[in-house]
Amino acid sequence: MAVMQHELTLGEAADLLSRALPGHRVEILQGRLIATPPPDGSHALSLTGLVVAFDRAGARQAGLRYVQGIGLWLPGLPDDYAIPDFCVVDEDFRDAHVQKNCYAPNVFRLVVEVTSSNWTDDLGTKVESYAEAGVPVYIVADRKHGEVLLHSDPENGKYPAPQRYERGASVPVPASVGVTLELPVDTLLDGD
């Protein structure tokens, strides 16, 4: 009897891995399958702080939505997508659904990543991927190095050198996001 073998596509492998690792965030970045463990308490509190800050800044009244854990379809390779920790998106972002709970990059105004065990992806691969996708603002709360990096205004698929903010400072959210707001570095790093 002949046995037929089926090679999995990267997308199919990502789906299998998602089911096998409940609570993990599975992404495909530059053709690499990435699985990130669930966030710790400080990471989760940082994201809660972002929700509160954008709510107080009037993001909804400005026609924006702030969401956690939705997919961002990336233009690099056919199966590439990321699942950022926190995003500010256009109010009608659901109209830009691509597939797999991912949305087209043009509806994303801001993406925030709070580093965890895979911090090198947030500081390298995602910087490249988000710039190539044209995400206007990318903020990284780099808990490994105790600073926050602000990437903005990508040109030709690349962000210029990031602005760096240390503890005690606040990160001004660029006006292109659509709200006026400063985010305390300590809250982004520690959740407090």
Image: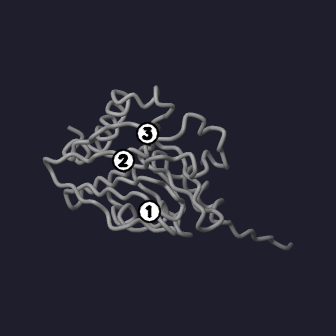
Residue at point 61% right, 45% down? Answer: 101
Q: Amino acid at mark 1?
A: Lys
Q: Which residue carries the number 1 mark?
A: 126
User: Is mark 3 in CB contact (under 8 Å) with mark 1?
Assistant: no
Q: CA distance from mark 2 to mark 3?
A: 8 Å
Kindly identify which numbered label has been placed on residue 178: 3
- Residue 175 is situated, as x and y percent measured from the top left of the image, at 38, 44
Q: Secondary structure at mark 1?
A: helix
User: Is mark 2 in CB contact (under 8 Å) with mark 3?
Assistant: no
Q: Determine whether 5 is above or below 15 in the image.
A: below
Q: Secondary structure at mark 2?
A: loop
Residue at point 36% right, 59% down? Answer: 151
- 155, 67: nearer the viewer: 155
Q: Nearer the viewer, mark 3 or mark 1?
A: 3
- Residue 36 is situated, as x and y percent measured from the top left of the image, at 42, 55
Q: Which residue carries the number 2 mark?
A: 174
Q: In the rendered image, which quarter is residue 56 located in?
A: top left
- 79, 103: nearer the viewer: 103
- Residue 60 is situated, as x and y percent measured from the top left of the image, at 46, 28
